[in-house]
Image (cartoon, rainbow, N blue to C red):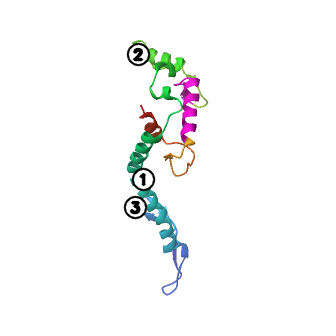
Amino acid sequence: MIFAINQSTRYVCSCYYTHNIFLPKFKLHVTYIDDKIFADIWKPVKTEVERRKSLGRDYLKRKETILKYYTPLNQEIYKLQISFLSLKFLKLVEHSKQKNASMQSLIKLMSTEKGERIYSFPIFTEEFCNSFKEEIEHFENTDLPKGRPNTMNNYGVSVATVNALLCIN
């Protein structure tokens, strides 16, 4: 804010030069502190962009290594079988193919969760889920490269890594 007392005296709040600076390109307001802080922020952003650019190449290398060296624990889970699917899911699929199926009739076959219009249903059997979990744990205990879902999660396995495992057969 600029306040003028008279023609020769003007006061400016120092925050006028640092706070609430709008960057139209990003539609974002920022607070400027100094050049070093912006440099400190820029470096991790650039590092993350480079990491993301390398994901595809890194995935292909990981997949090649996994296919070459990984020995599955439960070979049978690598080929989808009807027996892996829950009966509730199979009923939903069959019902949805019927000409008289409606949104309301499908909802009746699902579980209602807390919250408005939130429904759930199992896709896989508990036995399959346990076998799949054992397989992931077996893979986690190898020295093979693992892709993580994101930079904040050092313990999960990415869908891409699971895909690489599923390509074994």
Instruction: Give percent across and percent down for residue 164.
Output: 43, 39
Q: Which residues are magenta?
A: 116-139
Residue carrying label 3: 24
Residue beneath the point at 42% across and 39% down = 67
Kind of residue sitting beneath label 3: Pro
Marks counted in the figure total 3
The correct choice, above or below, for 61 with respect to 15 in the image is above
Instruction: Give percent across and percent down for residue 169.
Output: 41, 31
Tag of residue 97: 2
The correct choice, above or below, for 148 with respect to 43 in the image is above
Closer mark to the observer between disc 1 and disc 2: 1
- The reply to whether discs 1 and 2 touch (Cβ–Cβ < 8 Å) is no
Instruction: Give percent across and percent down for residue 78.
Output: 46, 29
Q: Earlier in the sequence, mark 2 or mark 3?
A: 3
Measure the alpha-carbon separation of dots 2 and 3: 50 Å
Residue beneath the point at 55% across and 23% down = 125
The correct choice, above or below, for 57 with respect to 121 in the image is below
- Neighbour class for label 1 at 10 Å: few (<14), some, many (≥20)? few
Q: Earlier in the sequence, mark 1 or mark 2?
A: 1
Kind of residue sitting beneath label 1: Arg
Query: Mark 3 falls on what kind of element?
Result: loop
Residue carrying label 1: 52
